[in-house]
Image (tube, helix red, strand yellow):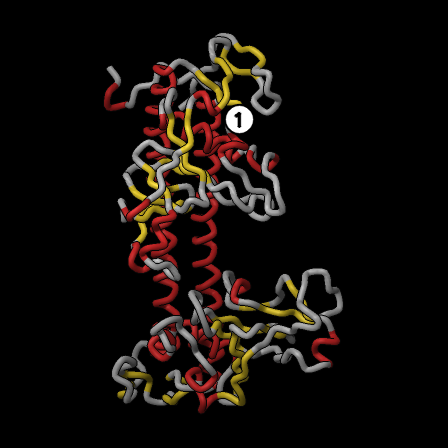
Amino acid sequence: MTFPAYPEYKDSGVEWLGKIPSHWSVTSLYSLASECDFPNKDMLESNLLSLSYGRIIRKDINSNDGLLPESFETYQIVDHGDIVLRLTDLQNDQRSLRSGLVKERGIITSAYTAIRPTASHYSYLAYLLRAYDTLKIFYSMGGGLRQSMKFSDLRRLPILKPAYSEQSAIAVFLDHETAKIDALITEQEKLIELLKEKRQAVISHAVTKGLAPNVPMKDSGVEWLGEVPEHWKVAKLRRFVRAVQTGSTPSASPPNTDIEDGTYWFTPGDFSGPIRLGSSSKKVPPEAIKQGEVKVFPAGAVFVVSIGATLGKIGYLLTLASANQQINAIIPNADVEGLFLAYSLSSKTSEMMNLSNASTIGIMNQEKTKEIWLTVPPLCEQERITKFLDEDCVTSDALVNESQRAIDLLKERRSALISAAVTGKIDVRGFAPVSEAV
């Protein structure tokens, strides 16, 4: 679908806005919106809201970590049609979406700036500020060590002002078109989840049942494992390892990205990609190793994230490396090949959660790690299984990457469409949804 440009344009007088439709005007934010200043005194409201990925979502006020109910008296009350802006830490985070439209009454942290449109269509203004956000307009405005802003810093922000009826038409158009794009994004996200679930099911079946369909089976003796191939060994991890050790963080010689001759140092953030770990963004200097501040683990070891939200993430080490204290390193013995062990452990996340101390935050110490149940075939069969899984994962990863590229393109399309409509690059006044068109 293509839309025409406006018949005539003029210079907006604002360098980053460029030319705008000739009948539009430019005004300041304070003339169209006021700052919300409604503290939640005496806990008037308990519907806790949060800005997440550019959307205002509900959160459970009773499970909010580290906050007592009375703490929410410092929050601010917002209502349907208000716009929330997270204008903190502008220097260090230039990727997050920083604006969101409130769709229900609730409370949100006073660290955010909340504004209420007074002489502008709320949805149009929200889309315009989102366009400013994606165009990175805010990042040149903040002050202070971490570049933060308040409403007083924004009040003279140039705002494009078409007639109210035109603002409404733009909002209707964008509501309709972005909803279609969002539906396509959701479909791709669901496909990615299905692909990941299928991949995990294939891994789990291969490392517990093998590849041969008619091999004789036996009872594993472990209820949740069920039957396993008759010739496989079934035992806890301690039976198949030479050592389980925990990483560390050196204090005298901290890891950083500028060390050229150091040793790779892994953290849980390095476990988002393929199962093989070849390099990390940070290294530890040789002196940290000489002084015994960090342990160094051999290629072929298996790294397991042992604490926190990513507990159970697995990596197979391709090179000599170290790791921080959130990671356990498993050194396999001669009975199990490291890559097969990595694939096996990647299907054990639920078991690890059950073994961890999950009353507060899940922790898998060395002894609990050794309690994980494994099913282990002969080495030649382990090699066949890992080769099969490598090939299957390549196919699966390619499909996931294709869907992720589609999502990225759809998000770019969404941002470009919003920017074009709210800055007058396209004329949508004649738009009507297909179902309403005559």
Place residue 78 in its image quadrant. top left
Is 112 located above or below residue 121 in the figure?
Answer: below
Measuring from the top left, give residue 173's x and y in whole percent.
Answer: 35, 24
Q: Amino acid at mark 1?
A: Leu
Between 159 and 277, the residue placed more toward the observer is 159
Is 106 located above or below residue 202 in the figure?
Answer: above
Between 95 and 148, the residue placed more toward the observer is 148
Q: In this image, 81 relative to 19: left or right? A: left
Q: In this image, 236 relative to 290: left or right? A: left
Measuring from the top left, give residue 217's x and y in whole percent.
Answer: 28, 85
Q: In this image, 405 relative to 249: left or right? A: left
Measuring from the top left, give residue 188's x and y in whole percent.
Answer: 37, 47
> In this rendering, does residue 425 appear at all?
no
- Residue found 64% across the figure and 78% down from its top: 294
Measuring from the top left, give residue 260's x and y in whole percent.
Answer: 75, 64
**How many marks overall?**
1
* Image quadrant in which the C terminus is located: top left
Residue behind mark 1: 157
Q: Residue at the bottom extreme?
A: 239
Q: Residue at the front extreme?
A: 42
Between 19 and 90, the residue placed more toward the observer is 90
Task: Give the secondary structure at mark 1.
Answer: loop
